[in-house]
Image: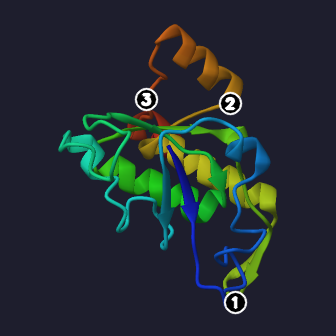
Amino acid sequence: MVVRHTAPASSPLFAEGSPGWALREEVARRPHAQLVDKTKASAFHGTGLAELRAGIGDGIGDGIDGGIDTVAIAGYMTQNCDESTARDAFHLGFAVEFPSDATGTVPLANSAGALSARQVHEHVLVVMQSNFAAVTTTDEWIDAVAAGVPLPRPSIWESTAPARS
């Protein structure tokens, strides 16, 4: 399944019909059972994807059966759509996998401060691995899927060990 962010034509980001809205060629040419358009940061908001966990039919249309228990997050931007989707998936009861090199972001600056793209990305990865998602590389993720081996799950207890030292 592929999820695409769709914004109104007047939007500076992901405007329907714009080059930034179009699927990247690497994604578009690969087979996928379904293309889901979303309008909010999380892929679970208003799309019917939450029903996949419950096994309530397919929840979103033809091609996907219910009862899915794991989602892998890839895409853009790490701290926005990817993190929002991962957190929602976690709270819905999905196991979440977050290939660290399959997401990306840009530097951020606003009235709260400024961070490089690397700082933003690494911050999200550390937080995801602390509780919400198994963070791994794409190669490690592919190997685990091919072997049918689950990724090690995150642990808030282990991640907060420095606070207890």
Is residue 103 shown to the viewer in this render?
Answer: yes
Locate residue 69, reporting x and y percent. Answer: 32, 34
Of discs 1 and 3, which sits in the foreground? 3
Number of numbered callouts drawn: 3
Distance from the alpha carbon under mark 3 to that under mark 2 = 14 Å
Q: Earlier in the sequence, mark 1 or mark 3?
A: 1
Q: Mark 1 points at which residue?
A: 111
Question: Label 2 amino acid?
Answer: Thr
Label 3 environment density (alpha carbons within 10 Å; few <14, some 14–19, many ≥20): some
Q: Which residue is drawn at 67% across and 36% down?
A: 30
Q: Tags 1 and 3 in contact by the CB under 8 Å rule? A: no
Is 129 situated above or below 140? below
Question: Label 3 amino acid?
Answer: Arg
- Depth check, front residue: 87 or 6: 6
Callout 1 secondary element: loop
Locate residue 87, reporting x and y percent. Answer: 42, 54
Q: Residue at x 48, y 66 (%)?
A: 38
Q: Earlier in the sequence, mark 2 or mark 1?
A: 1
Res 137 label: 2
Q: Which residue is drawn at 55% across and 39% down?
A: 32
Q: Mark 3 points at which residue?
A: 153
Callout 3 secondary element: loop
Res 32 label: none
Label 1 environment density (alpha carbons within 10 Å; few <14, some 14–19, many ≥20): few
Question: Label 1 amino acid?
Answer: Ser
Residue 111 sits in quarter:
bottom right
